[in-house]
Amino acid sequence: MVNLTDAEDVNPKGLSVSAENDADITVEQNTDTPVDEFPAEDLVFDASDLSVYYGDFRAVRDVNMLIKRKEITALIGPSGCGKSTVLRSFNRMNDLIPTARVEGTLLYRGVDLYDERVDPVEVRRRIGMVFQKPNPFPKSIYDNVAYGPRVAGRKKGLDDVVEHSLKKAALWDEVKDRLQESAIGMSGGQQQRLSIARAIASDPEVLLMDEPCSALDPIATARIEELMAELKDEYTILIVTHNMQQAARVSDRTAFFSVEVDETSDRRTGLLVEYTNTEKLFSNPDDERTENYITGRFG
Amino acid sequence: MQNELRGNFHEELDAVRDMIVTLAAHVTEAIPRATEALIDNNLEMAQQIISHDDDLDALSLQIEERCYALIALQQPMAIDMRSIVTAMKINGDYERSGDLAVNICKGLRRIYGIQLTPTLRGLVTSMSEEAVRLTKVSVDAYAEGSAGLASALPDMDDRLDDLQVDFIQEIFASHARGELKLEETVQLALIARFYERIGDHAVNIGERVMYMVTGVTPEVAGAAQAKHAAEVDALAEVAEGVAEEEAE
């Protein structure tokens, strides 16, 4: 039974979980890098042989990843390696692109995210997304945060939700006296934290972040990174970043994606090269392609 | 063909490596010269070595500062990070080996005028040669990034340790025969210790080179080695048991 909404009794945050999840899971990646072992209840995503196509063009192939609860997982790699595509497949954002489709399986809490009976709106509520450019609605700060819960039909307790979300996003103290002012007047860093507050307001379990700091200055970036470390206590976070140092600073595990070019068609397909503990990946990676990329010996 | 994206940085890394090799070469030359000064009672030569050490210290400091700058400015990762960390560590080892050559010269000043017996001269010369050999192999291992060479160093160092034991026994015997005064005996024992320490630094360097090449820290490698040895012992016990059973 596929059920995204009525599983609260099984797991307050999660979904109904399939039976085989009792056993502990050994994380073995397609690069044969054992990451470590963790209990089944900590498994949030299980991608196996995941490929994403745009029409007949395969953008990324054969991704095998297990994502652990309350950890920050970073996705890094050169342009065109498919890291954003993979991130977007984790909450079905690719559905919005008519030609996009996935092959392989992507389980969220044991439920196939791409099962036709699964409601993508519910998926995106539980798996929130923060984009590269903060995109506040031209409304008040309050209305921006309250938007998600209102759309979901919530009418009572909105004040509490807004305050809680803004506090979680480390923005409350800066805006509590001007909640009715327009969000457009905020600084870039504040707008990005507002985006995070807006995602949090829908009470998600997972936050996907696609280059959340690339439009921000170093101070604002540091605040977001600090915030991520705090959010980790409650949320599972996946972040795509071009900034390797950022991946090294904030994440627990890092997945390195690379590109292979088909010589006859000149088509570029992304693939997961190495996925392991962040410290290991940046100090002693197993794969030469990872080594070449992170040390700048890549072209 | 790969395009080098961080060419300047990697040239800087090469420059650090060359500086370490230069430092090691100076140290390698200082050791036999200190030995020569000791055997020949040559105070002038000893003083030259002592003065020259200031240059080596300056070079060592320069290497260290360059490594700091690379870390601060380039955020090195993977093999680059391991190379810089290794350079910083072994920089200290070579600098210390240079100091030990100086210590040998200072020891000479305290026992100036004594004539070493042919046996003691031979043992000192052998210790010096072993110390030089170990230092040379260590720098070759580093410059070539050779884990094989690096892993040979601990066994090579055993020979220097044995020579030191022989030398100490010989000076005690000489003292007992009345050929060496107590103070001379103590100074010579210290000098033997200086050679032996140079060997230890070469072994440390080897461990650091292993880390640079393989990414495995010496502590982890040591634990793995101990585990392997225990497994071999366990297997040997089983084999013995089988052999005994067969004999019965």
Image (cartoon, coloured by chain):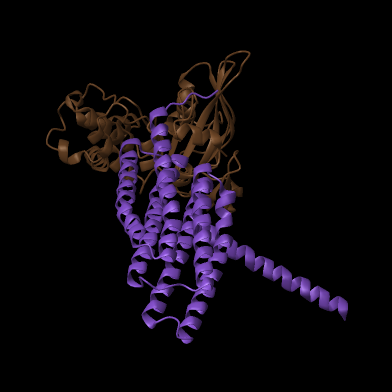
Residue in view at x 21 percent, y 38 percent: A171
> Which quadrant, please, contains the C terminus of chain B?
bottom right
Question: Of A138 and A83, which appears nearest the observer?
Answer: A83
Q: Could you tell me if residue B178 is visible in this image?
A: yes
* Image position of B71 with respect to A292: above or below: below
Question: Of B41 and A259, which appears nearest the observer?
Answer: B41
Taking A111 as reference, is A157 left or right?
left
Count the marks: how many?
0
Indicate the quadrant where residue B103 lies. bottom left
Horizontal and vertical percent position of residue A157:
25, 40
> Which quadrant, please, contains the N terminus of chain B?
top right
Indicate the quadrant where residue A33 lies. top right
Residue in view at x 60 percent, y 64 percent: B227
Horizontal and vertical percent position of residue B53:
33, 54
- The chain letter of the purple chain reads B
* Image position of B173 with respect to A40: above or below: below
- The chain letter of the brown chain reads A
Residue in view at x 51 percent, y 35 percent: A290
Q: Could you tell me if residue A12 is visible in this image?
A: no
* Image position of A17 with respect to B201: above or below: above
* Image position of A224 with respect to A187: above or below: below
Horizontal and vertical percent position of residue A142:
21, 32
Horizontal and vertical percent position of residue A291:
50, 36
